[in-house]
Image (cartoon, rainbow, N blue to C red):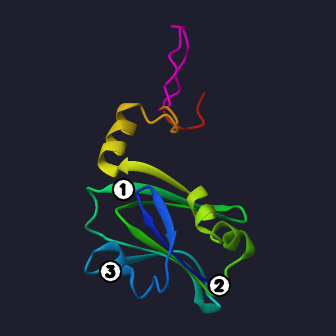
């Protein structure tokens, strides 16, 4: 498998490209892209799924990429244009998610700018997190409290 997709959060598009690994900097309009590995096979060094992105694109619109392999879900939040790179013997479940531009589009959610989204998420009370634990208050004033750990009675 050799698939390369240009993901553009400004145009909200996913386009299959040729030679995406070699042309990543050109496609993203950046000088030195970073590479983040989403999946790799330790026994096959040429089998991996990576995303090349511009580390200086923090203030640009972003996207969330979510891939599932077995029971594991890998999620990345990336700002700016990026190139998704799938090479080698990729597992069937991942290969299916990366088989076409439409399939990749299904794994992506465009989220706007990261900073604004994080601020909005925090202001909303972070709905997907648990509320802090509260200490219970007893209404029984005669309740005995234990002090110390000795075995004396």
Give the number of marks.
Answer: 3
Q: Secondary structure at mark 3?
A: helix
* Marks 2 and 1 in Cβ contact (< 8 Å): no
Which one is nearer the viewer's eye here, 112 or 91?
A: 112
Above or below residue 79? Residue 124 is above
Residue 31 at x, y percent in the picture: 25, 80
Secondary structure mainly formed by the magenta segment: loop
- What is the distance, in whole Å, between disc 2 and disc 1 at their CAs? 28 Å
Q: Do the residues under discs 1 and 3 have CB atoms within 8 angstroms?
A: no
Q: Earlier in the sequence, mark 2 or mark 1?
A: 2
Residue 141 included in the magenta stretch of the image: yes
Task: Name the quadrant containing residue 30.
Answer: bottom left
Q: Which residue is mark 1?
A: 10
> In the picture shown, does residue 120 fall above or below 103?
above
7 or 58: nearer the viewer: 7
Mark number displayed over residue 26: 3
Give the residue displayed 73% in from the left and 65% down from the top: 70
User: Is residue 49 placed above or below 61 in the rendered structure?
Assistant: below
Residue 111 position within the rendered picture, expressed as x and y whole percent measured from the top left? 42, 48
Is 139 left or right of 43, judged from the image as shown?
left
Which is nearer the N-term, disc 2 or disc 3?
2
Instruction: State which quadrant residue 56 falls in.
Output: bottom left
Q: Secondary structure at mark 1?
A: loop
Please give the range of residues in magenta: 132-147
Q: Quadrant of the N terminus?
A: bottom right
Placement of 60 over or under 28, stated as above or below: above
């Amino acid at each position: 498998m050799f698939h390369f997709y240009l993901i553009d959060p400004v145009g909200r598009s996913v386009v299959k490209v040729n030679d995406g690994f070699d042309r990543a900097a050109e496609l993203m309009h950046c000088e030195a892209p970073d590479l983040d590995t989403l999946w790799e096979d330790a026994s096959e060094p040429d089998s991996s799924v990576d995303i090349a992105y511009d580390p200086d694109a923090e203030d640009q619109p972003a996207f969330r990429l979510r891939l599932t392999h077995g029971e594991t879900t890998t999620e990345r939040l990336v700002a700016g244009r990026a190139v998704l790179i799938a090479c080698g013997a990729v597992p069937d479940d991942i290969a299916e998610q990366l088989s076409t531009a439409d399939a990749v589009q299904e794994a992506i959610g465009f989220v706007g700018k990261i900073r604004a989204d994080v601020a909005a998420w925090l202001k909303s009370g972070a709905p997907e997190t648990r509320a802090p634990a509260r200490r219970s208050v007893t209404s029984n004033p005669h309740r005995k409290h234990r002090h110390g750990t000795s075995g004396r009675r």
